[in-house]
Amino acid sequence: MSSELSASPVAEAAAPSRARSSRAVRLVAPAVALVITIVLGGMVLLQLRAQDAIAERDRDTRMRLVAGAVTGAFDNAGKFALSLAEASARRPNVGEALARRDRARLQALSQGPYEYLSRQAGVQIYGFHTTDLRYLLRMHRLETFDDDISGFRPMVVAANRGRRAQAGVEIGIAGLGVRGIAIVEHEKSLVGTMEVGLDLRPILDLVKASTNADVAVVIAPAMVGVALDPKLPRFGDLVLALSTDDDRFAALLKSTRMRALRDVEVTTREIEGRPFSVVSQPLVDFSGRLVGMTIALEEIPNDRGRLRTELVVAALCGGILAWIVFAVLLRIALTSRRRP
């Protein structure tokens, strides 16, 4: 009986202490939860911004690599076309036949190489020009010959006047192509030139296969000085000459006013409601003259929302766990303080 009477005052004295501890937990815990929420929210915001910056930097780097791949493909194609032209121009009896302007002999010498190269190497143009700038023989168009090409074939003019081989992009009546023009000599005298031209479409397809980006060649008619095919789609001051996806690039050129640039530019565009990374760069011909631009685009994957959701859920779970741990530790600390 005496022990029960002595325990009653102790219990009565501990009751206010427990009440104060409970009130402290109820007051402090929400404040700490708010602080944790603000801190985690700030961390999430910073992380999201960092993700956006990293993604944008990665897209910029990747698209510049795609632009480099396009430039490299064109350069390599020009060198390849020139090597084929040089090899053909130096074959035995070719110089003599061109010096005599013997079309039948040149055709007989060229028939086999042209058939093989057109089938295996994508050669579209294979022919010989005289020193007075007339097209003596077109293996790709035998019915047309001896016409004056001085007014619309600047590569041939440059090769004959400068007595130097030429390689690169040229825009002519036959369209846009990568061509190599070699000097043909006989007895150490210039007797004409020989050219090999490659189709650009396989080159663009190769770039797409290696980079997974669609590519287009866009011409600015005002910069070319040669009449372009009227059937080519025109968008303001630009003409879509060639692409790996005509519909997509047509939608881009319709919705965006683009202009020929003198430097590489990477942007983000929306095409038919979907975001794309777009890189454009100048297109120059064999002489270094700006004639248009090449455009490459790649759809931006829609994984941003999923990553953000995962990050926010992880932050919320961390905040809840932190609040629970803090509340438990606070209660333990307050309980230990009131013990004698």
Image: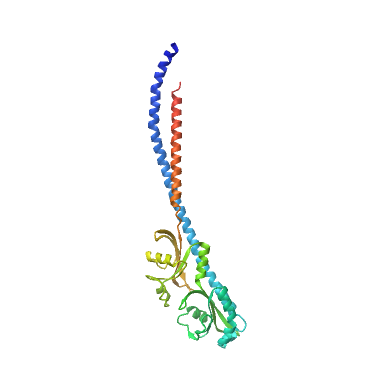
In the rendered image, residue 46, in percent from the top left (x then y), is placed at: 43, 47
Q: Is residue 113 shown to the viewer in this render?
A: yes
Question: How many discs mark residues in the rendered view?
Answer: 0
Quarter-of-image position of residue 300: bottom left
In the rendered image, residue 91, in percent from the top left (x then y), is placed at: 61, 80
Assign the N terminus to one quadrant of the image: top left
In the rendered view, tell whether residue 61 sits above or below residue 228: above
Q: Is residue 189 shown to the viewer in this render?
A: no
In the rendered image, the residue lying farthest to the top is: 2
In the rendered view, tell whether residue 105 sits above or below residue 120: below
Residue at left offset 44%, top offset 35% = 324
Residue at left offset 48%, top offset 85% = 147
In the rendered image, residue 214, in percent from the top left (x then y), is placed at: 47, 64
In the rendered image, residue 107, in percent from the top left (x then y), is placed at: 57, 84
Of the pair 260 and 190, the residue shown nearer to us: 260
Quarter-of-image position of residue 184: bottom right
Quarter-of-image position of residue 228: bottom left
Of the pair 218 and 274, the residue shown nearer to us: 274
In the rendered view, tell whether residue 284 sits above or below residue 321: below
Residue at left offset 51%, top offset 65% = 207
